[in-house]
Amino acid sequence: MNIDTLLDNTGAWMSSGDDEQIVITSRIRLARNLKNSAFPGWGGVEECARIWSSLRPRLAGLPSIQPEIDVGMDELEELDKQILLERHLISREQVEKGRGSGLILSADELVSVMVNEEDHLRIQVLQSGLNLATAWEKIDQLDSEIESQTEYAFSDALGYLTSCPTNVGTGMRASVMMHLPGLVLMEEMNPIIKGLGKIGLTVRGLWGEGTEAIGNFFQVSNQMTLGEREADIVYNIEQIAREIVEHEKNARARLVEKKELFLKDHIGRAYGILTHAHLLTTKEALDLLSDLRLGVDLGILKSVGRQTVDELLMTAQPGHLQKLEGKALKPKDRDRVRAKRVRERLSRGDSKPKRQSRTHE
Amino acid sequence: MNCELCQAHEATVHLTQVIDGSIKKLHLCEACAQKNGFDMQGPISITDILLGMGGKREEAAAPTSERSCPRCHMRRSDFKKSGRFGCSACYEAFAEDLPSLLRAMHRNDRHIGKVPAVAARRVQFIKELSDLQQALDQAIAEEKYEKAAKIRDRITACRASMEQG
């Protein structure tokens, strides 16, 4: 597989349109297992290898995944694994796997199946914006396609049987990724995280945990998988996500209204550092780019487009950065190269290169 | 505050989960948290850790004759250590442990979501078989043997197609 082909775009997970300022993507994954085999963590490498070689051609031929890319974890360089991780196509656990585990992926990155991660199959469907209902429709169909070729481990009482009992039942995790800088700046994120916890939803940082979420990107997902219908879980999270979007819009409006000077200063400083720094860690770059994204959304920052910011949010990550440089780099060198790339990209601008010297009002 | 497991190091990992309306808290040091499979990056489940802790205490007390899965030979202590089952048959082998675990983790203890077509067909077959069996019993009771023979043939056919999937 040629991972390099993925680098031509910012990745499906961040191809946000104009309506998707706050909700970036909707994602559903299903955990499934084969009826007569031990789960990957217990069955051993040989059994995993046998399952992978039998599933690989069958999954690769599925109509819902065309055109597809399929690759064994043992066929990938470390850097390629890192890229797939940063693009949310494999998990941290899958990165650690070698022979016997693999990935089937549609070329547009919207559909993917991890084989022999924690479960035999981890099916994932992604949609941009707030669109869990469509994601469920698509993954339901793909799941039925796979099921027509192989028998799943299923019990009438407990549903789909998974390696970890936290996933048993629907085996479904539905999540919505959101950019919530307004709520973080207004210090209103903590009560929301606590409140959602009480109704069985989990809020996690896209990078990092809790309110320490780097770049103010959060994922809201269901924790429970047994005793609820898939469609109800999906509906519930969509409703909650709509409410959070309203809260975020409200927080942004109050920032503009009551703390305009603070807001402009905050965003201006982020732009100043990003355009002039010579060393940038991943965390600092992502945090500042998040501020820039808010500035663009609010019309405070006019010299940069959101697409540029989103592209940088992707390429500032260590795997992508090293891949673009064409070699492995030490952390200190990465910080230097990252700063250089960000500086150059921002001064180049989007479509109005002449305005590069004037940043904002 | 010191770690509730080793009592030696400062607790830096604080877990809170609401189970059946009551709040359970757990304070661990980083080493113990990691040892118990608490993944700093992954989703948090206090139950996995609680289960792991229970396993350790019990192992020390009574390591003899423990239950294990007849199919994949995972022992109960293996499950307690990892929080993960070995195969789908483990759900039956360790059925005794499940209700409290599932209640702590989930909304309910019964699946009401999607059913694979194969399983749905099986349920249909089972219903059809039980209907036919009833009809057969009735036919025999009424001494309508010709009818009973026909029903018996249908039962045989239904069983055959059920086995074929």
Image (cartoon, coloured by chain):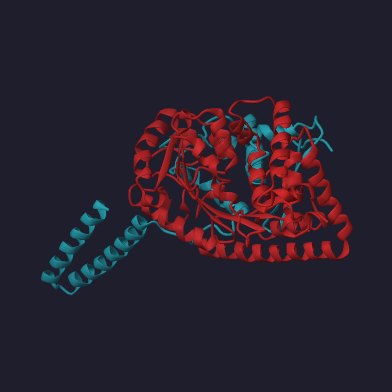
Chain colours: A red, B cyan
Q: Where in the figure is residue A72, as x and y percent of width and height?
A: 44, 33
Decide which of A250, A338 is in the foreground and name it. A338
Q: Where in the figure is residue B161, as x and y percent of width and height?
A: 22, 56
| For residue A230, above or below residue B49 | below
Q: Is residue B89 left or right of residue B60?
A: left
Decide which of B126, A107 is in the foreground and name it. A107
Query: Residue pushed farthest left?
Result: B146
Decide which of B86, A72 is in the foreground and name it. A72
- Res. B111 visible in picture: no
Query: Residue pushed farthest front?
Result: A354
- Residue at the image point whose x is 21% and y is 61% from the top: B155
Q: Is residue A318 left or right of residue A184?
A: left
Decide which of A92, B156 is in the foreground and name it. A92
Q: Quadrant of the C terminus of chain A?
A: bottom right
- Res. A348 visible in picture: yes
Q: Is residue B16 left or right of residue B138?
A: right
- Residue at the image point whose x is 50% and y is 47% from the top: A109
- Residue at the image point whose x is 75% and y is 60% from the top: A298
Q: Where in the figure is residue A255, as x and y percent of width and height?
A: 83, 61
Question: How many numbered marks, from 0 up?
Answer: 0
| For residue A54, above or below residue A134 | above
Q: Is residue B93 left or right of residue A191?
A: left
Q: Quadrant of the N terminus of chain A?
A: top left
